[in-house]
Each structure stands twice: as C-alpha cells, then as structure tokens.
Amino acid sequence: MSDNDRQPGQEDEVDRALALQARGGDQSAMRQLVERHQPMVLRLCQRMLGNRHDAEDVVQESFVRALRSLERWDSTRALRPWLLAIAANRCRTALSKRKPLVCDQQVLADELPARRDGAQRLKQLTEEVALALGELRPEYRQAFELFHYEQLAYAEIAEVMSVPVGTVKTWIHRARQETAARLIRRGVVEKVEERVDRSEIQHALPAIPRAAASLTG
C-alpha cells in the first residue's frame, strides 16, 4: 500500500448495504457483517491486548455494541474504521483495568530487511523486533499496525484513533524511525553503508511479506 489514502471501493459499498439491512433488523445481514470483519477486529484486539482469550472477549463485546449502535453510524462514511474505533475503545477500557502484558513475540518480523540466515536468524530477529515494538509508544505501534497490517488509509486510522490525519502520519513515520534505530543499535541490521542510507532501511521495514520469505529461504 502506498502512502496515498485509498479510495472507497466495492467492499465499502457491500458493507454499507449490509449495515443498512442490519439496521432494519435483518439477522442474516448482521451475521454477514460479523463474518466479514471478525478476523480484522480480532487481529486489532490481539495486538492491543497481547492475549487471544482477552481479545476474543473484546471482539464479541465490540460487535454487540456495534450492532446495537448502527442507528448512530453515519452511512455516508465507511463502516470498517467505525467498527475498528469501537474495538479500539473497548481494548483501551480493558487495558485500563489490568497491568500491561508482555508483548507478543510475533510482531514486526515481516517488516525486516531481507536476510537469508535461516530459521535461527528469524527467531533472533523476531525476538529483537518484539522488543523494539514494545518500546514504542502505544499510539505509534497502533497506527503503524493499522497502516501496514490492516491497510487502512490515513483518514481511516485518524477516525479509529480520534486524532488528526497529520498526527497519524507523524506517528507512523516515528514508528519506522524508532524501530529502525533500535535494530541498527542492537546490530540486528547492518550499520549504514555508503550506498544505503537510513531512509532506505526505514522503507524496508514494512516490506510484507517479501522480507519474511527471504528470512526463511
């Protein structure tokens, strides 16, 4: 996905049609909405909560709230960021009620520059990027993951996180910078060479899934 905001497409129109039907009480449309978006919402909740069991509970709660609140959804806007905003808010509520959990090990491994050092290298890199991601401010991490994993547009992320679009762009940029800086500092990736500047390393981070294939190749 490029840094340009994606335009609403056919998927948004399908969501809109289903949501309007669900708003009218259509149970089949409600089920279809949940089936379409449950994997995406679950991924978000797992990343924010770091625990699948807790994430599944929040996903269920989020869809119940969303379906009950469809009357308040603005049908001129995309449904997906509205659903994610509800889930993110429920995650923040859940996090406020417990101590932070250890960061999930499977984090930014796919964003690392291509290397061919085998499975042991992949394990080491995965552990290092888990630490790197864990050191990011929560809002940097969430914005980065929504952009690179869920492929949301800047405007959609802004809606999910309730901040201006410019702030979202800044957070994603800083997430790239800080992750790259830690990996370089820890020797996980090589120091800057004559023909490779830091910006190129930063742009290599979100190379999904090419880097992962190279790491295991």
Image (spheres, rainbow, N blue to C red):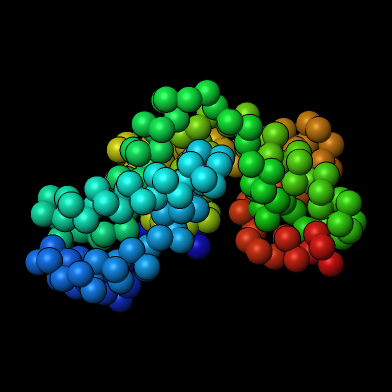
Q: Position of residue 209 (x, y in %)?
A: 66, 64
Q: Position of residue 85 (x, y in %)?
A: 32, 45
**Would you identify the image quadrant in which residue 13 lies?**
bottom left
Which is nearer the eye, 44 or 64? 64
Q: Residue at x 30, y 38 (%)?
A: 162
Q: Position of residue 68 (x, y in %)?
A: 18, 52
From this view, report whether residue 123 is shown above or below residue 161.
below
**Would you identify the image quadrant in which residue 32 lies?**
bottom left
Which is nearer the eye, 117 or 184? 117
Q: Residue at x 83, y 44 (%)?
A: 124
With 180 as the anchor, is 40 left or right in this view? Answer: left
Which is nearer the eye, 89 or 167? 89
Q: Residue at x 50, y 53 (%)?
A: 43
With 212 as the anchor, is 79 left or right in this view? Answer: left
Image quarter where the C terminus lies is bottom right
**Would you identify the image quadrant in which residue 179 lies?**
top right
Which is nearer the eye, 172 or 120? 120
Q: Position of residue 208 (x, y in %)?
A: 63, 61
Q: Is residue 104 visible?
A: yes
